[in-house]
Image (spheres, rainbow, N blue to C red):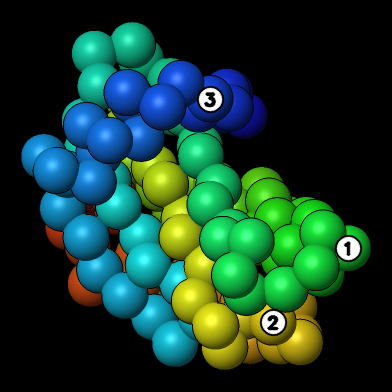
Amino acid sequence: MKKTIALKENHEFRRLYHRGTSSAGRHLVLYCRKNRLGHNRLGLTVSAKLACAVKRNRIKRLFREAYRLHEDEFATGVDLVLVARARAVGATYQDIEKSLLRALRENKAAAAQP
């Protein structure tokens, strides 16, 4: 079982936005960059412009759960940031999961090598 730690520092998010590779699904954008830590770090971004706090927190819970269940499909030793799009508001878990897996397939740096 892989270990994933939360990404919290602003400068780490900014580094991923500028130097990482990105791929987009319908409900989210996935940014990925290798780290030299041997474990993954996951950051979640849901803008206050999208919805009230209750809905933003629900989106983050759905993102976390979708990532947790598909953690084995991600490469080891990467920083990941999931950015919610406006369509994520009111989306079902299945929508979020499908969008995450699509973004993962498009992003070679994030996908685990078979």
Near mark 3 (Cα within 10 A), the count class, few <14, some 14-19 or many ≥20, is: few
Residue under the image location 52 percent in, 68 percent down: 84
Disc 1: which residue: 54
Picture layout, residue 73 above or below residue 92? above
| Residue 57 located left or right of residue 63 | right
Q: Residue at x 33, y 11 (%)?
A: 37
Q: Residue at x 27, y 35 (%)?
A: 14
CA gap, disc 3 to disc 2?
23 Å
User: Which dot marks residue 12?
Assistant: none
Tell me the amino acid under the disc marked 2: Val
Mark 1 secondary-structure assignment: helix
Badge 1 or badge 2: first in the primary sequence: 1
Q: CA distance from mark 3 to mark 1?
A: 20 Å
Q: Residues within 10 Å of mark 2 (few under 14, many from 20)?
A: some
Please, is residue 25 above or below residue 58 in the view? below
Q: Is residue 91 left or right of residue 42?
A: right
Contact (CB < 8 A) between labels 3 and 2? no
Name the amino acid type tagged 3: Lys
The residue that disc 3 covers is 8
Report how far apart the C-alphas of labels 1 and 2 lie in the structure.
11 Å
Instruction: Give the amino acid type for the residue marked by disc 1 in the picture.
Output: Val
Pointer 3 with pointer 1, Cβ within 8 A = no
Left or right position of 21 against 79:
left
- Residue 51, x across and y down, in percent: 72, 73
Choose the circle earlier in sequence order: 3 or 2: 3
Q: Earlier in the sequence, mark 3 or mark 1?
A: 3
Q: Residue beneath label 2, please?
A: 89
Q: What is the x, y in percent for residue 61?
A: 78, 56
